[in-house]
Amino acid sequence: MSLTVDEAGRALADPRVYADEGRLHDALALLRREAPVHRVADPPGYNPFWAITRHADVMEIERNHTIFRNAPRAILGTAEYDAMNRQRAEQGVALRTLVHMDDPDHRVVRAIGADWFRPKAMRALQDRVKELARRYVDRMVESGGACDFVQDIAVHYPLYVILSLLGLPESDFDRMLKLTQELFGGDDSDMRRGTTPEEQLNVLLDFIAYFQELTEARRAEPTDDLASAIANAQVDGRPLSDFDTVSYYVIIATAGHDTTSSTISGGLHALIEHPDQRGRLRADPALMPYAVDEMIRWVTPVKEFMRTATEDFDLRGVTIREGESVLLSYPSANRDEEVFDDPFGFDVGRDPNKHLAFGFGVHYCLGAALARMEVRAFFEELLPRLDSIELAGKPESTATTFVGGLKRLPVRYSLK
Ligand code: HEM
């Protein structure tokens, strides 16, 4: 059945479409071809936005960050969610993480955590990450040759890495996992705690309560973890407000694992579906860094971020008016025929690979080096030990317009 451009635009505001790759990419390909800067005027339940689907246009908007600001609409939420956020901002109780901020605040606050994610800090963390990768591949062996790779393996491993970096005790990890899934799986009936904005607010309040306690502990007794660096950071000679401190934890704890676990699951799925590429990678481990970026492009776990224009801006002959919001579609940019040869082919040696899965410009993903290291460590541990692997059931994806990927990947395998 052929789609109209308007239907394709509205599909970008339908969480269910993201759970069906074929449907999503049909809509995106149509928009890229026929209406790359497209006004979605009446998405049911959502406020209007412009859908930006070309790689070059996503970059241009992100490059013009003084015109296109993250506040007040950083991600696509329902109209009800937007209204609640506006109200909370007016009351001064809105979550304000790095992705909700603009310069000058953004630059200052980003700098607090930046050193912890530089390659030097990453090298220090490498042994711990490798040890965790081994632990989870061992767990696959212990599962006796079959498991749901997402629920049994992929959701735990990146969480352990990021919470270790923050300095949280292992006994709290499961609680964090649940809260993160409730926060990020907000559109998906399997994941969410409830359907109303109030129930979602309660998830957020639980997060806040946990991290407020952590901040107090680290202020009273600093240690050498990232949580202490955040708790004791000074901006203009003053500590961060309680709200900004909690927001920092929330972005690190949440951005750091659903994204990476989706990449690992989707990456394994791609290797199962493309045995030639799996064989190629196994035969030539030097391809691993390219394979990692190809998995990240292939999965593109972050589906969108938004920006709001602070002045009129012309893009491809279309005027985006001051106050209007744009949705940057990363899955679309990463299948753009103008940039990628054979964009729908999975190629573990793809070079160049200028994907935008980590965004671009001043908000470029802070955890990109960590994410690459985690994905690489996992497959470097898994592949040499893997004799065979196949699907043992139907994979299923999360219904979300924001961050997601597979939520079930039943597999059967033989592993040393
Ligand atoms: C921001 C993707 C893993 C922390 C972002 C953005 C994207 C992204 C698209 C927004 C960029 C923009 O607006 O231009 C991903 C993907 C990951 C991943 C695809 C895994 C494959 C991580 C990890 C961390 C992390 C492991 C570690 C804590 C952050 C933070 C920001 C961010 C703190 C906000 C940066 C800012 O606004 O200045 N990420 N991310 N991410 N990411 Fe990641």
Image: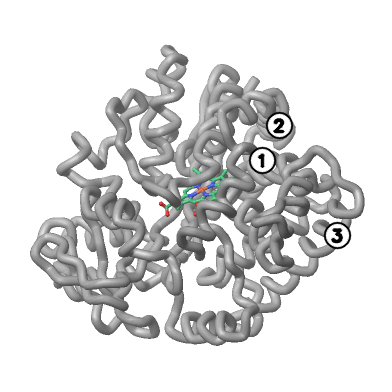
Q: In the rendered structure, find residue 71 and report the number of the disc placed on it.
A: none
Q: Nearer the viewer, residue 220 or 32?
A: 220
Residue 245 seen in the figure: yes
The mark nearer the N terminus, 1 or 3, is 1
**Discs 1, 2 touching: Cβ within 8 Å:** yes
Q: Quadrant of residue 212?
A: bottom right
**In what quadrant of the picture does the C terminus appear?**
top right
x then y, percent, for residue 99:
50, 60
Which residue is depicted at the point 54% across and 22% down?
A: 383
Residue type (three-letter) at the residue carrying disc 3: Glu
Q: Which residue is mark 2?
A: 132
Q: Which residue is mark 1?
A: 157
x then y, percent, for residue 3:
17, 69
Which residue is depicted at the point 16% across and 62% down?
A: 315
Label 3: few (<14), some or many (≥20) within 10 Å?
some
- Say which element carries label 2: helix
x then y, percent, for residue 116:
64, 38
Which residue is depicted at the point 26% across and 46% down?
A: 335
Q: Nearer the viewer, residue 345 or 38?
A: 38
Q: CA distance from mark 1 to mark 2?
A: 7 Å
Q: How many numbered dots are placed on residues in this image?
A: 3
**Discs 3, 2 touching: Cβ within 8 Å:** no
> Comparing marks 3 and 2, which lies closer to the viewer?
3
- Say which element carries label 1: helix
Q: Which residue is mark 3?
A: 216
Q: Quadrant of residue 13?
A: bottom left
Q: Nearer the viewer, residue 51 or 323?
A: 323
Badge 1 residue CB within 8 Å of ligand 1? no
Residue type (three-letter) at the residue carrying disc 1: Tyr
Horizontal side, residue 143 vs residue 72: left or right: right
> Comparing marks 1 and 3, which lies closer to the viewer?
3
Q: Is residue 112 above or below residue 33?
A: above
